[in-house]
Amino acid sequence: MEPKIIDGKVISAQVKDEVKEKTAKLLEKTGVQVCLAVILVGEDSASQVYVRNKKRACEYVGFKSLSYELPECTSQEELLELIEKLNNDDTVHGILVQMPLPKHIDEKTVIDTISPKKDVDGFHPMNVGALCIGEEGFVSCTPAGVIQLLKRSDIEISGKECVIIGRSNIVGKPMALLMLRENATVTVAHSRTKDLADVVRRADIVIAAIGKPKAITADFIKEGAVVIDVGINRNLETGKLCGDVDYENVAPKCSAITPVPGGVGPMTIAMLMNNCLESAIRFSGADI
Ligand code: NAP
């Protein structure tokens, strides 16, 4: 059986086009121009690429983007002051601080300082708590993107056995809560899980988020399973990107699978745009 290839480029473009349309509607109805502030500290080249891509996406969907590119030597106090200023600026709807930060700045303090109402990354403890108890808040963009990939590919989640491999705060844990919200039966596996292959073989839906190239091989996969590969790993020899899943050998066993690149990756920025629009809609009180 040929697996369905879940195309993250197509689905992320759909999400961004919907955001673009609603952004124009919001502006027309209320005069509110959606605005995302992006802060980058230091000169990490990967972070610079991410920030550039985020600015480009803002332009595409019609957001105003404010960009703060601060030197490596910026003190924690200076960064917190800027965040407070943006928290208090009613024209700013989303604040994103690009991680990782230089070592002398405490990431947790930074995350805690961003107003939960503008925390479009969904990392603030209030938003994580809201997700946990099913209240309204911002959801971490990558797992939110996985849900969109599944839903827009007409993959049934309710009642399915889902195994998530990885338990990080930005992917594995929020992913588990979202799949639970969608009524899957959820297992979270990690580096201490015994007999990982046996656990993963139970799954109708496998979500791999471990950061180990091709660690999930065909013997982990039940015939007909759906496989979502969140991993983004660079092969140091070829320079090419690969996922956590051994795609060539796993794909023939699946009913559907995401490629790397072009699967989960493009969804993250699309969902960031969606979160920022949601924030502006909430601020405006409009019914869009
Ligand atoms: P992370 O913080 O390093 O967490 C990795 C998780 O995987 C941990 O929970 C770890 O278990 C578990 N793990 C590691 N090796 C394992 C193994 N051999 N067997 C089972 N579990 C194992 O990573 P992350 O931030 O969640 O990211 C995971 C991957 O997703 C990375 O490749 C990253 O680049 C990618 N990613 C992609 C996007 C995107 O598509 N836009 C966004 C974020 C991340 P312990 O907790 O026991 O250590």
Image (tube, rainbow, N blue to C red):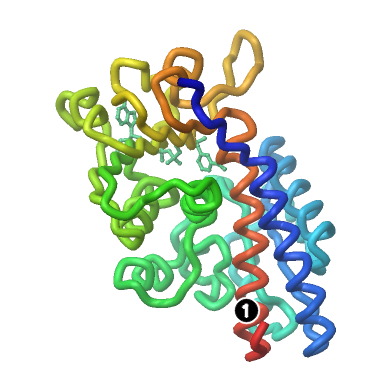
Which residue is found at the position 36% from the left and 17% from the top?
A: 217
| Residue 90 placement, left or right of 212 | right
Vertical order, 112 against 219 (above or below)? below
- Circle 1 — which element? helix
Pinpoint residue 198: horizontal percent, then vertical percent.
19, 25
Number of marks in the rendered image: 1
Pinpoint residue 209: horizontal percent, then vertical percent.
41, 36
Which residue occupies the extreme top position in the image? 237
Vertical order, 122 against 221 (above or below)? below
The quarter of the rendering in which ligand 1 is drawn is top left
Residue under label 1, please give it.
87
Tell me, yes or no, if residue 105 can be seen here: no
Which residue is found at the position 58% from the left and 46% from the top?
A: 102
Q: Amino acid at mark 1?
A: Asn
Question: Which image quarter holds the C terminus?
Answer: bottom right
| Residue 84 placement, left or right of 66 | left
